[in-house]
Amino acid sequence: MKLEAMQYQTIQVSPLTPTIGAEIAGVDLAKPLTQQQFEEIHAALIRHLVIFFREQTISTEQHKEFGRRFGKLHIHPTSQMPGHPEVLEIKADENSTWVAGEVWHSDVTCEIEPPMGSILHITKVPDNGGGDTLFANMYRAYELLSDPMRQFLEGKTAMHEGAQVYAGRHGKDPSRQYPVAEHPIVRTHPVSGKKALYVNRNFTTRIVGLNKNESEAVLQMLYQHIERDDLKCRFKWRPGSIAFWDNRCAQHQAMWDYFPQKRYGQRVTIAGDKPY
Ligand code: SIN
């Protein structure tokens, strides 16, 4: 059966917007998933691109176990939680000079096989609100381009460079190497078969084959296009909320509008394939 057509029997699914995002109820992620629960959650992810769960009390081990149902866990190239290399801590406080994910992106696209999905469990939210995360639908971004622009981008690739994001955070040590990858500007999702726009402000540095000015102009146009409000949903976290997003067809941005307050969570990331 096509995942998009699946009827849910074990979970309740409430879309946040018609374009992207849905809240899932009826499942306790601290317990191992049945096969039916797994298939329904997977179908909801494919249909809505990002899914949300509320009031989940899970340990780091249970979080990793949930992630492993969807694939091998990814290890971040620069940030790993002590004792749990597959976990990325998301944290901000009065001493922070940056937070992860402030700029629109899909996770770690500087790798040759970027992560398929990411599962973020937030346990501390800022005291006076803020710290929402925005998500945007990259299928829709592709569909809303004109035919001539889609034809222009067809077959083109872009470079994605880790140094653009990580070098400033981890110092200018010249011996430190960061991942670099070349990806199609339009990728095909391996499960849905649909085309999605696949460049992002964080990691993409240039379009292969264009000169610098041309590349910069096209990338800036695409970034503005991707950030249109009608592609987005906005998620308001509460302690115990979980967001699970599909990096192959969605981008996200974390709002850092709560400095100097604290926000804390843990992210488990699922390995992916080489985009085509
Ligand atoms: C990220 O994983 O990019 C951070 C998202 C967030 O903190 O909401």
Image: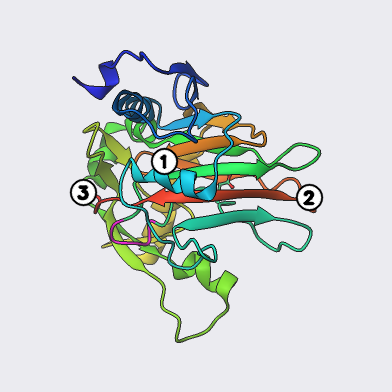
Q: Position of residue 130 (x, y in %)?
A: 72, 39
Taking the image as drawn, is residue 198 in sight? yes
Asked which quadrant contains residue 3, the reply is top left
Whole-Å distance between the Cαs marked 1 and 3?
27 Å
Splitting the image into 4 quarters, where does residue 36 fall? top left
View extreme (front): residue = 31
Lower position in the chain sequence, tag 1 or tag 3 = 1
Tell me: residue 208, above or below residue 3.
below
Q: Are marks 3 and 2 in contact (CB under 8 Å)?
A: no
Q: Quadrant of the N terminus?
A: top left
Which residue position is annotated with label 2? Answer: 261
Of marks 3 and 2, the one in the foreground: 2
Q: Nearer the viewer, mark 2 or mark 1?
A: 1
Q: Main secondary structure of the magenta part?
A: loop
Q: Amino acid at mark 1?
A: Phe
Circle 1 sits in a helix, a strand or a loop, which is it?
A: helix
Counting residues from the start of the chain, the first of labels 2 and 1 encountered is 1
Start and end of the magenta stretch? 109-113
Q: Which residue has dot 3 on it?
A: 276
Q: Position of residue 259 (x, y in %)?
A: 77, 51
Q: Position of residue 245 (x, y in %)?
A: 44, 38
- Mark 2 falls on what kind of element? loop
Q: Nearer the viewer, mark 1 or mark 3?
A: 1
Q: CA distance from mark 2 to mark 1?
A: 29 Å
* Whole-number angstrom distance, CA of label 3 to CA of label 2: 41 Å
Query: What residue is drawn where x is 40% and y is 32%?
Result: 49
Up-down relation of residue 233 to residue 77 (above or below): above
The residue identified by callout 1 is: 66
- Within 10 Å of disc 1 (Cα), the crowding (few <14, some 14-19, many 20+) is many
Depth check: give the residue in front, 125 or 206: 125
